[in-house]
Amino acid sequence: MMKILFFDTKEYDKKLFNEYNVDYGYEIKYLETKLNAETAPLARGYDAICIFVNDLADKDTLEILKECGVKLIVLRCAGYNNVDIDNLPDGLKVVRVPEYSPYAVAEHAVALLLSIDRKIYKAYQRTKKYNFTLNGLLGFDIHGKTVGVIGTGKIGRAFIQIMKGFGTEILAYDVFENKEAEKELGFRYTTLDELYEKSDIISLHCPLTKENKKMINAESIDKMKDGVVIINTSRGKLIDTKSLIDKLEEDKIGGLGLDVYEDEEEFFLNDMSNSYKRDRGLSLLLSMPNVVITSHQAFFTREALDKIASVSLSNIKEFIETGECKNEVRK
Ligand code: NAI
């Protein structure tokens, strides 16, 4: 019987995985605590662990897991920047859910954009109080604007498809250009510099790597149009928070929509409202009138959760039966 220890689990994870596990019958234990070098010893006696975006599998943690007898790390997400793949010990494998719903994330990016542009978050609070004035709610037409998309993988392409429907021109940047998609969806690949220079709206859809950490910083923001709207549903560490705050204060950035934050690990997905613990950068951003922040919820649709649970459990089955898995993350 496969024994699996889940880290950083919420009620919705338990409900869903229990439902899908009826077909597999794995022995599952759910922990609320996050994975790190301190909590890794809890995995002793388990064959596999299942982790999420803010669990940390760094070199030390991986070595402890291996020593505890864990053979498989099951990521119930697509991104794997939180696992130190280069230092993965032999005999320990990592699998992920490469695609669960690109639409969920792409649609959330659009929701952030519309909310910022048309000030839906302000209007909601006003009308609740029976205040029906329009002062301060002026937006802009998205139609006719230029949208810069960084990363044209599954989510980036789903985002492009939606934005084409708005009547926008799309400039894209990717380290691997997909010429077929470029032709089919009607966008144009360009350099990062041209994308920064010409885009009214910039949306990030690339993974976090060593090379692109803090790629959005004071220098790159200075290359952008005045009043640019930046949307990040990808990974928080792609953006340097201090530069973001400076450039919002200078009025260089016109609007900001974040579903991820540089130092989100301690805060996002948790109720911190009764705690005195605060992150200064996050607090400053939250206090700004043209910033909308959601708590890593872009993936959170019924369709995506179903796929996450079913693919995670079938990844384990494939691993048990063949010792391999098509969704393995390799060094
Ligand atoms: P994907 O693997 O299909 O596409 C990623 C694309 O980014 C690829 O085309 C790749 O060539 C490109 N890329 C890699 N390095 C790059 C760089 N330095 N600059 C520009 N492009 C680069 O991945 P997918 O499914 O589209 O997901 C993208 C990212 O979205 C994930 O890595 C993850 O960080 C984030 N994500 C966020 C979620 C949320 O709930 N907020 C949920 C799921 C994913």
Image (tube, grey):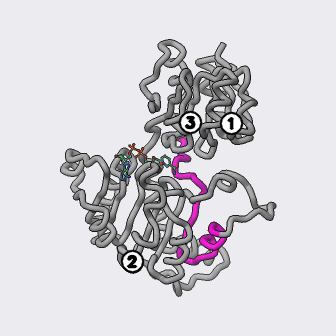
What SS does tag 3 mark?
A: loop
Q: Give the range drawn in magenta.
A: 281-303
Q: What residue type is labelled 1?
A: Phe
> In whole angstroms, how far apart are the C-alphas of marks 2 and 3?
38 Å
Q: Residue 140 carries which label?
A: 2
Q: Which residue is drawn at 53% across and 87% down?
A: 135
Report the residue marked by disc 1: 7
Badge 2 crowding class, 10 Å Cα cut-off, few under 14, some 14 to 19, many 20 or more, is few
Looking at the image, tell me whether mark 2 or mark 1 is earlier in sequence order.
Answer: 1
Determine the image quadrant of residue 253: bottom left
* Labelled pair 1, 3 in contact (Cβ < 8 Å): no
Report x, y in % for residue 23.
59, 18
Report x, y in % for residue 254.
45, 77
Between 68 and 12, the one nearer to me in the picture: 68
What SS does tag 2 mark?
A: loop
Q: Can residue 300 be seen in this view?
A: yes
Looking at the image, tell me whether mark 1 or mark 3 is earlier in sequence order.
Answer: 1
Q: Can residue 145 be seen in this view?
A: no
What SS does tag 1 mark?
A: loop
